[in-house]
Image (tube, grey):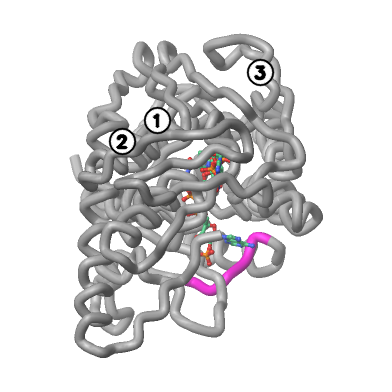
Amino acid sequence: MIITPKTALITGVTGQDGSYLAEFLLEKGYTVHGIKRRASSFNTDRVDHIYQDPHVENARFKLHYGDLSDTSNLVRIIQQTQPDEIYNLGAQSHVAVSFESPEYTADVDGMGTLRILEAIRILGLEKKTRFYQASTSELYGLVQETPQKETTPFYPRSPYAVAKLYAYWITVNYREAYGMYACNGILFNHESPRRGETFVTRKITRGLANISQGLEDCLYMGNIDALRDWGHAKDYVRMQWLMLQQDQPEDFVIATGVQYSVRQFIEWTAAELGMPLRWEGQGVNEVGYWNGKPIVKIDPRYFRPAEVETLLGDPTNAKQKLGWVPEITVQQMCREMVAHDLAQAKQHAFLKQNGHEVLLNKAD
Ligand code: NDP
Ligand code: GDR
């Protein structure tokens, strides 16, 4: 029997998950189409290593300009590519930013999902194209039950989470109304060296690595008592694919089942860099000292108008039905992120010592 290789379309291919998922699917023999946004400078750093010159015959990785706010563009790309699987990973994904740009976040994260589902329907691809929606533990927000599982009631706490709530339900609705293979992965936080620099784990590993090399003086943080269930993005994209390979579409919680505080992640990072921390003071006056130097301070600017204090997932269903087991622990992930950011910081320090100007993008 000849098995025809599948075609996948990934929105958000230039993001953390999109880049790992594209790698994963290419290794499985897929042809992968990705949607990238037009920007005034290159924005494909995370996928440059898998880029294939479109002039090469049989290129299996192809990028298309597009945007989740543009219906006609989405319809055209889906019509051209006729995907077997669509992974909707594109989003304004920063919770704090969603309070600054709530309408844009609603349009892209909420309506963007509807636009893709409608495109599948308009093009008559309901029976061909399987759809994965990047749902989130932020849906649980003010948690109603611990640990959180597929049946736990939602209570979103940000414009981001409210937009994702719409996306979650419209995905369920299209599954029920039109018999589409559409499902939600309710993913808890997952990180990696490719994590955006303004999310908390990367801000910490990058900030403290820079401090260790004398490139910065102090790391300013928000609510360091927040508790999260952190996994590795590589483990989580494997699951995104698994969810589209089942007989019946179903929504799954993906998490590690272990929870730590932001403070704990700061301590691991500092220890890994050989900079053990001593905390003094309380609340907004709390300071982390290394060798008598204040290197971690609290800045209320990073507090959110409504916070999600605690998240802890129960991945039992995914483990039982998908046979999914996370392979990388949060401590291993922290070490990998520190090693990556320390190597970068050392390069910058070397350039600086040799008289070159080094301008660091400040994570905010
Ligand atoms: P990233 O922020 O790293 O990537 C988001 C991607 O979406 C980027 O490629 C970005 O493009 C793209 N994008 C942003 N706005 C638009 C738009 N208007 N039209 C098209 N594309 C757009 O997120 P992650 O990879 O971490 O997350 C992937 C998805 O999973 C997101 O939907 C996120 O909300 C969700 N999620 C993430 C979790 C996590 O812990 N990482 C947990 C649960 C859910 P550009 O590169 O140009 O900015
Ligand atoms: P989150 O991730 O909001 O959970 O959303 P983030 O890493 O931004 O925050 C986690 C927790 O850390 C606290 N925090 C800070 N956060 C940031 N970014 N910067 C700080 O300085 C800081 N100090 C403390 C936050 O208040 C929060 O409690 C991520 C995104 O990837 C979403 O797209 C995804 O849906 C969820 O994870 C699951």
Residue 176: % across, % down: 68, 26
Residue matched to label 1: 264
Reading the image, the residue beneath label 3 is 143
Give the position of the C terminus as an image quadrant: bottom right
Of 316 and 102, which appears nearest the observer? 102
Q: Nearer the viewer, mark 1 or mark 3?
A: 1
The secondary element bearing badge 2 is classed as helix
Q: Is residue 7 left or right of residue 93?
A: left
Disc marking residue 268: 2
* Residue closest to the eye, 203 or 179: 203
Q: Earlier in the sequence, mark 1 or mark 3?
A: 3
x, y (%) of residue 348?
27, 74
Question: Would residue 166 appear left or right of 8 to someone viewing this image?
Answer: right
Give the extent of the magenta segment: 64-68
Marks 1 and 2 in Cβ contact (< 8 Å): yes
Q: Quadrant of the N terminus?
A: top left
How crowded is the residue under tag 3: few (<14 C-alpha within 10 Å), some, or many (20+)? many
| 305 w.r.t. 245: above or below | below
Look at the numbered disc 3 and give the secondary structure of its residue.
loop
Q: CA distance from mark 1 to mark 3?
A: 21 Å
Please say whether residue 194 is one of the residues in the magenta stretch.
no
**Residue in the foreground of this view, choosing between 258 and 64:** 258
Q: Compute the Cα span from label 3 to label 2.
A: 27 Å
